[in-house]
Image: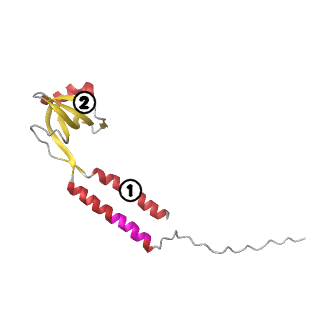
Amino acid sequence: MKRRVRLLGGFLSTLALLLQGCYETLPVQQGVPPSVVTVQLIMNDKGRAEVSSMLGTAVNKVEGIITEQSDRSYTLSVSRVMQLNGNTSKWSGEKVTVAKDGVDGYQVYRLSQKRTIILVAALVVGVALVFITASLSGGSTGSTVTNPVTPPQSQRIP
């Protein structure tokens, strides 16, 4: 029983890691980014300087959904900020305006259908293996109850 619980725990940990792999970031693009999907704006030096008071120093990418855009700026509902040193911070949808000339391009961050299908198939196989293993072992816990032997009585010598 403990072995199955350990296997299930390991499986769930692996699942959590695999769920991250269901998303993909498309190559850097130029032009007008879409406003209904999550995008990552890639900041240049000018943009980093302009957003440092709002987002922190050394910002590499700002991720979120574009809620407004004009000739000169994008307004994002920010979900994550990535810095040049690799640190990231999660945000909860605060609106931030970024000048277009402070952005080198953008990347679309989306759910990958191919990776998701592979994950679902792996999950189905994993769950099937857990059930097959349980049925082959007969569903027993591995312990058997036996009649205990009464230990001999100690004899007292007078």
Q: Does residue 84 lie above or below 138 as drawn?
A: above
Quadrant containing the C terminus is: bottom right
Check disc 1 and report the residue beneath it.
Answer: 12
Magenta segment: 125-134
Dot in front, 2 or 1: 2
Pinpoint residue 88: horizontal percent, then vertical percent: 29, 38
Taking the image as shown, residue 8 lies to the left or right of residue 102, namely right
Q: Gap in Å between the C-alphas at discs 2 and 1?
A: 35 Å
**Is 43 in front, or is 30?**
30
Q: Residues within 10 Å of mark 1 (few under 14, many from 20)?
A: few
The amino acid marked with disc number 2 is: Lys
- Rendering quarter of residue 143: bottom right
Pinpoint residue 129: horizontal percent, then vertical percent: 37, 68
**Is 90 in front, or is 117?**
117
Which of the two labelled residues, at mark 2 and mark 1, occupies the earlier sequence position?
1
The amino acid marked with disc number 1 is: Leu
Pinpoint residue 66: horizontal percent, then vertical percent: 19, 35
Q: Secondary structure at mark 2?
A: strand
Residue located at (40% from left, 58% from top): 10
Check disc 2 and report the residue beneath it.
Answer: 95
Does residue 130 belong to the magenta stretch? yes
| Marks 2,1: beta carbons within 8 A | no
Taking the image as shown, residue 15 lies to the left or right of residue 71, namely right
Residue located at (42% from left, 57% from top): 9
Residue located at (16% from left, 47% from top): 26
Residue located at (76% from left, 74% from top): 152
Taking the image as shown, residue 138 lies to the left or right of residue 61, namely right
Q: Which mark is residue 136?
A: none
Pinpoint residue 15: horizontal percent, then vertical percent: 34, 55
Q: Secondary structure at mark 1?
A: helix
Does residue 157 belong to the magenta stretch? no
- Rendering quarter of residue 76: top left
